[in-house]
Amino acid sequence: MKKIFQSSLRANMQALKNKQYFNYGGQGPLPSNSIKAIAVSWQKIQELGPFTNDVWPYITKEILTTKNLISEICGIPPKRISLTENVSSGCIIPLWGLPFSAGDHLLISDCEHPGIVAACKELARRKELKIGVLPVQTLGTGYDKKNDLNKKLLSSLDLHLQRNTKLVVISHVLWNTGQIMPIKLIAKKLNELQTKPYLLVDAAQSFCHIPVKDACDKADIFAFTGHKWACGPEGLGGVALSERVLKESSPTFIGWKSLKAEVGIHIKKKEPFHSDGRRFEIATSCIPLLAGLRNSILMLQKEGTESERLTKIKSLSSKLWNELKQIEEIELISNKPPSTGIVSFIMNINKSPEAIVNTLGKQRLWLRVLEDPKWLRACVHITTNKSELDNLSRAIKNIKMS
């Protein structure tokens, strides 16, 4: 196996110089070189003129270069990629354009982010749809130690799918338990149904964390962000779309980027929108962020292949999981070493999760509280080192003793 070196990426992250950071699932540190790339791009645009004929070739090249890099990671053609601001917009913009009818059924896992759940509930209210819940939270956790995860999930799907299910919403990596969902198997199951429900996948916790090609290719809507595990700038993400979504979903948020041309928009019979991923892009966006995201991704790739990086992440998260397992008052959510960099747990002491996070924060150790369910979550990346894991475990142990 190719050796993975942490030095270049970790040393380039100013945020890691004065703290021990375990919130990659919330936002990854932005490397200094990515900040410089953003600044250089901004300067270039000003040199060319922010709205001149000279600047458009540069902007077009920045967009195409970024989409090509993302398409390599996702394993799909660039035309199926739409650049967005974040996961929420990547999910919602194409979702709200799908052809729903009153009475259609939406099936949403019980581990989806509140923002996506809220969007689906509002969609259901407006379109008179019904919502069902697919239980996945206990799969592979300490609360459910029986059976194979994939078999149990597919069995649960059988129980909860209805004849009129039009959409299934599930994350690739569950943001609270850290479990990887078998998206390829779920897609196969849905495609065997006569109604062939759409599959929307929240990839916030998987993009640049685990390999995504199979899941991305099989999902209808696969939305991701650059500011978490990719360690890119906030305000830039994307969504990979299936061919049928490109054909069947109407644009919802509409602007000049959605249009084939601004000329002729008043002609009634003319289809104004792009047929590729651009139909879900809206209007003026921050071009320099593209250079920042590309730089971060390329720096990650220099650390090793996707599989090599995941092996390193799992080694670190397993070490943390094992250390926490030795603390009597800790209740680990997963009943086995993590398959990703997410380690969630409960501290059964007379302190709230918020108080625990505040206490650790005073020691420059940062993790987060999950609101629903009320768990603590620590995330490790290839930039994490073993001494940080030891420091976190020791600090947690000291909290329970105080």
Image (tube, rainbow, N blue to C red):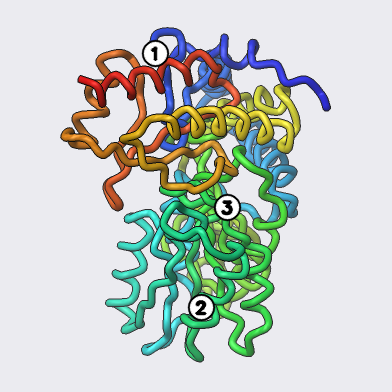
Separation of disc 3 and disc 1 at Cα? 29 Å
The residue carrying pointer 1 sits among few (fewer than 14), some (14 to 19) or many (20 or more) residues within 10 Å by Cα, namely some
Residue at horizontal 19%, vertical 29%? 355
The residue carrying pointer 3 sits among few (fewer than 14), some (14 to 19) or many (20 or more) residues within 10 Å by Cα, namely many
Pinpoint residue 293: horizontal percent, then vertical percent. Answer: 57, 30
Per the image, the residue denoted by label 1 is: 19
In this rendering, the answer to whether 152 lies above or below 326 is below
Residue at horizontal 46%, vertical 14%? 16
**Is 276 displayed left or right of 166 in the figure?**
right
Q: Which mark is on residue 265? A: none
Residue at horizontal 26%, vertical 26%? 400
Q: Quadrant of residue 135?
A: bottom left
Give the structural element (helix, strand or loop) at label 2.
loop
| First reached walking from the N terminus: tag 3 or tag 1 | 1
Q: Quadrant of residue 401?
A: top left
Which is nearer the eye, 378 or 267? 378
Indicate the quadrant containing the C terminus: top left, top right, bottom left or bottom right: top left
Q: In the image, what residue type sits under mark 1? A: Lys
Pinpoint residue 150: horizontal percent, then vertical percent. Answer: 62, 65
Query: Does the image show residue 343?
Result: yes
Q: Which mark is on residue 180? A: 3
In this rendering, the answer to whether 199 lies above or below 211 is below
Separation of disc 3 and disc 2 at Cα? 46 Å
Q: Which mark is on residue 268? A: 2
Q: In the image, what residue type sits under mark 2? A: Lys
Query: Does the image show residue 257?
Result: no
Q: Nearer the viewer, mark 3 or mark 2?
A: 3
Pinpoint residue 309: horizontal percent, then vertical percent. Answer: 68, 31
